[in-house]
Image (tube, rainbow, N blue to C red):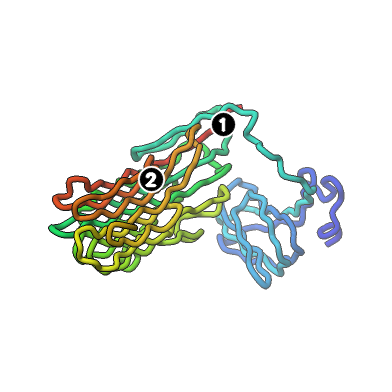
């Protein structure tokens, strides 16, 4: 139709400024196919009754989105599939948009406040805050493994860490905080932490001394990072799980995933000075346990979201039979536990997960 693909500068086809009206269809049933084609561009399908629904632009590929929202369709299409309440009328508009550039440091002029959440419940955004927040999520850390009469335990893994920037948050969002694992069972992990539907996975626990691997994908746990193998085991460390858009990471807020690292293995030496493997950290893998060396946990991820720098998801260190070595890694939040020596006097549980939200008030 005239004006559909050659747009006027402002509102030439009716409707709001720079939105060219195409046509409307009546929803005789809740599921309709409309033989309407178009070229790539920004489109919006509006419900006359302001009902919820969904629209699909169908061509060589398909792009879908909710009603009453602007949708970037990057391909031509030959038909439109619509799901909306019966007897509604929906109207198609094509938008003309101007090019822009990035507005650097957009929050710099606003007062900002961190809200650190350490127990499950809800986050309520203050009424006067911007609907865009920065978020850090960390899963619970895995516990350190037991030592036995001649071997030290492996280090627990730190929880994975997810960072979200300018994430849209309005009203109330449910929060679940993953607990740290106590490492009592080497085949275990820290709890997963949720902010709405986005979640960071907990770290795997360290293997017990004398024959146990670290917890990871290989024994059925989708851990954020793998636990270290127990001393004297000759086993591999746990294998970490890399989160994707479809496994909890999401697409909103330019998500950054930190984790998916393996725990350190153990080369099987039976001498009591042999260390267990280090747990994987959000910033890197744990190291292999050797006699009097190795077994360090992987590094965590540094962030200043609280206003000063802290570390999240550091892996725990593997232990010797008679000592665990000096763990100098920063272990502020969601860390893995250090492995235990004989009697487990120094065995450490994993740190609890958390959610930190920094919100902005104009």
Circle nearer the viewer, 2 or 1: 2
Point out residue 170 in the picture as x, y percentages from the top left corner.
52, 38
Res. 179 mark:
none
* CA–CA distance in space, label 2 to label 1: 32 Å
| SS for dot 1 | strand
Q: Which residue is mark 2?
A: 329
Q: Is residue 274 visible?
A: yes
Q: Nearer the viewer, residue 72 or 69?
A: 72
Tell me the quarter of the image containing the N terminus: bottom right
Within-10-Å neighbours for mark 2: few <14, some 14–19, many 20+: some
Q: Nearer the viewer, residue 319 or 59?
A: 319
Point out residue 341 in the picture as x, y percentages from the top left corner.
19, 52
**Which residue corresponds to the image point at 49% horizontal and 41% vertical from the top-left?**
303
Q: Which residue is mark 1?
A: 360
Within-10-Å neighbours for mark 1: few <14, some 14–19, many 20+: many
Examine the rendered structure and indicate whether residue 48 appears above or below residue 6.
above
On screen, residue 179 versus residue 282, left or right, reads left
């Amino acid at each position: 139709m005239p004006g559909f693909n050659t747009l006027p500068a402002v509102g030439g086809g009716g409707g709001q400024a720079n939105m060219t009206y195409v046509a409307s269809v009546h929803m005789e049933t809740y599921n309709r196919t409309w033989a309407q084609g178009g070229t790539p561009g920004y489109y919006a399908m509006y419900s006359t009754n302001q009902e919820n629904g969904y629209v699909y632009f169908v061509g060589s590929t398909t792009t879908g989105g909710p009603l009453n929202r602007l949708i970037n369709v990057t391909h031509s299409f030959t038909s439109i599939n619509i799901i909306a309440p019966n007897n509604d009328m929906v109207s198609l508009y094509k938008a003309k948009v101007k090019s822009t550039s990035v507005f650097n440091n957009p929050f710099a002029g606003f007062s900002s406040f961190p809200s650190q959440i350490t127990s499950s419940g809800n986050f309520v955004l203050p009424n006067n805050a911007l609907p865009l927040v920065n978020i850090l999520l960390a899963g619970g850390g895995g516990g350190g493994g037991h030592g036995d009469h001649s071997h030290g335990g492996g280090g627990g893994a730190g929880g994975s860490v997810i960072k979200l920037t300018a994430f849209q948050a309005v009203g109330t969002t449910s929060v679940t905080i993953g607990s740290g694992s106590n490492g009592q069972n080497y085949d275990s992990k820290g709890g997963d932490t949720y902010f709405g539907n986005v979640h960071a996975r907990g770290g795997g626990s360290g293997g017990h001394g004398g024959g146990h691997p670290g917890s990871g994908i290989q024994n059925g746990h989708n851990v954020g990072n793998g636990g270290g193998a127990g001393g004297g085991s000759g086993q591999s460390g746990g294998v970490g799980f890399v989160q994707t858009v479809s496994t909890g990471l999401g697409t909103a807020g330019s998500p950054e995933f930190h984790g998916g690292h393996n725990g350190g293995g153990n080369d099987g030496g039976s001498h009591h000075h042999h260390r267990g493997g280090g747990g994987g950290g959000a910033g890197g893998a744990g190291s292999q346990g050797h006699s009097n060396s190795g077994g360090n946990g992987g590094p965590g991820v540094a962030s200043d979201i609280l206003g000063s720098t802290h570390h999240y998801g550091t892996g725990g260190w593997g232990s010797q039979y008679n000592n665990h070595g000096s763990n100098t890694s920063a272990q502020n939040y969601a860390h893995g536990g250090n492995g235990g020596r004989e009697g487990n006097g120094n065995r450490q549980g994993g740190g609890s997960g958390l959610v930190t939200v920094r919100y902005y008030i104009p």
